[in-house]
Image: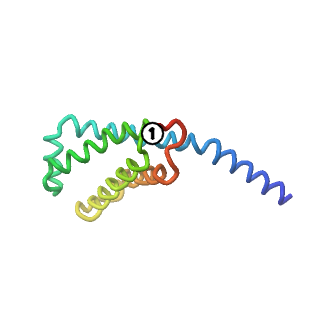
Amino acid sequence: MLSLTVCYNELMYDFFVYNNGEWVLIFSRVVLGAVMIYYGWLKVKDLKKNGMDFMGMGFRPGIFWGTIVAVLEFFGGILMILGVYTAIVALLFGFEMLMGTGWKFFKAKKRFPDYSYDIILLALALLIANFGPGLFALY
């Protein structure tokens, strides 16, 4: 009975990891890319306002850091969906989310619900950076 259970578990593991694991990576890649495009577009369409927002948060010069984040989020999101340079883009997203979480926790003294979304995006970015882009990536 034990050998049947082990065999069954191994078959299920093989099915989900080797067959569906690639689809999970694609889904994660598209979700992360779409979220970053959305928030990046809000920043890209008004870089001056975005720069002032960053200045207000204490990032100096605000226009410099705000532009870097806007470009990373918008164009990095496009690259992520296409599956181009996914490991590099995912690590950059992860670094951005780590900095955002740190800023919200230490400087702004925000509560967990205010930075939990950043932690989720960090986890998605690390997943993609570690396991790759999945199927249909252009590299």
The front one of 22 and 107 is 22
Q: Amino acid at mark 1?
A: Gly
Q: Is residue 13 left or right of residue 31?
A: right
Asked if one can make out residue 114 in the rendered structure from this viewpoint, the answer is no
Residue hosting label 1: 83
Q: Position of residue 45 (x, y in %)?
A: 21, 34
Residue 127 against residue 138 in the figure, above or below: below
Side of 119 where 48 appears, left or right: left
- Which residue lies most toward the right here? 1
Q: Is residue 96 visible?
A: yes
Q: Quadrant of the C terminus?
A: top left
**Residue at the limit of the structure toward the front, as seen here:** 139
Above or below residue 29? Residue 94 is below
Comparing 86 with 16, the one in front is: 86
62 horizontally vs 71: left or right: left
Can you say whether 21 is above or below 109 in the image?
Answer: above
